[in-house]
Amino acid sequence: AQKVTQAQTEISVVEKEDVTLDCVYETRDTTYYLFWYKQPPSGELVFLIRRNSFDEQNEISGRYSWNFQKSTSSFNFTITASQVVDSAVYFCALSEAVPGANNLFFGTGTRLTVIP
Amino acid sequence: DTGVSQNPRHKITKRGQNVTFRCDPISEHNRLYWYRQTLGQGPEFLTYFQNEAQLEKSRLLSDRFSAERPKGSFSTLEIQRTEQGDSAMYLCASSFRETYEQYFGPGTRLTVT
């Protein structure tokens, strides 16, 4: 069965601090995809990144970086020099590559508050 | 705007009434998904379409729920005889093909009184 765990329910940081959001997943499949989405107060889920299970290279996009470690089944997300606009709920999600729905299994989210 | 759109954005209805939501996916996306999100939770999968075919339904989708995607374009989600437990945000997403990232619409927030 698939499962995504985001143990941090809420995090508060002061602007310009770095913050890491944790994501641990479970799946029996060898081929799968991992995602991060941002849900700002407006409510619309915004796609941030998609990684496949065969690509363990870390990725950096501006102030955002992702660390994928298959050995620990983790896909953590770091925001460097946080800004108030980063305040949102962040969801980690898993999709299996088997034929079928390939729907997203989401964690319960981490609410990030960046204090000015 | 070429993103996923959903209408209405908010719906308040009385228990027992029927409601219908509409989703317009990104054009050329052949996959369309419906999810439900309750307060403090991540979205949960309800059903999906590949073109006009509804290929899978979650056990969350009781027989009071029905979804269609005529002609493989927009989709509708109908809830019959609404119950208070149906109150949630209903999200629609589309993707170019399987395993690709899904782009979400703004959602329809349903409140059943």
Image (cartoon, rainbow, N blue to C red):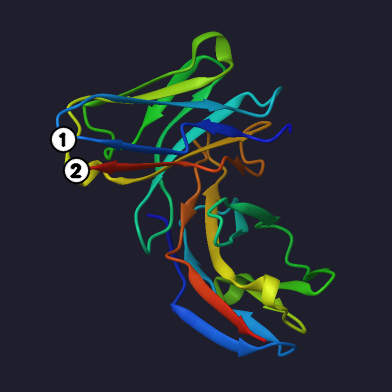
- Tell me the chain of label 1: B
Residue B95 to residue A79: above or below: above
Say which amino acid is labelled 1. Answer: Arg
**Residue drawn where x is 19% and y is 43% of the image:** B113
Residue B3 to residue A57: above or below: above
Packing grade of label 2 (10 A; few <14, some 14-19, many >=20) is few
Residue A68 seen in the current view: no
* Quadrant in the picture for the N terminus of chain A: bottom left
Circles 2 and 1 in contact, beta carbons < 8 Å: yes
The quadrant where residue A2 appears: bottom left
Q: Viewed as shown, does residue B113 lie left or right of A26? A: left
The x, y position of residue B55, in whole percent, is 43, 23
Q: Is A66 or B19 nearer to us in this picture?
A: B19
Packing grade of label 1 (10 A; few <14, some 14-19, many >=20) is some
Same chain for mark 2 and mark 1? The answer is yes
CA distance separating discs 2 and 1: 6 Å
**Residue drawn where x is 85% and y is 70% of the image:** A62
Residue hosting label 1? B15
Residue hosting label 2? B113
Say which amino acid is labelled 2. Answer: Thr
Q: Is A8 or B86 nearer to us in this picture?
A: B86
- Residue B24 is tagged as none
The x, y position of residue B13, in whole percent, is 25, 34
**Residue drawn where x is 57% and y is 40% of the image:** B105
The quadrant where residue B36 appears: top left
* Quadrant in the picture for the C terminus of chain A: bottom right
Q: Viewed as shown, does residue A38 lie left or right of A17? A: left
The x, y position of residue A84, in whole percent, is 68, 77
Element at badge 1? loop
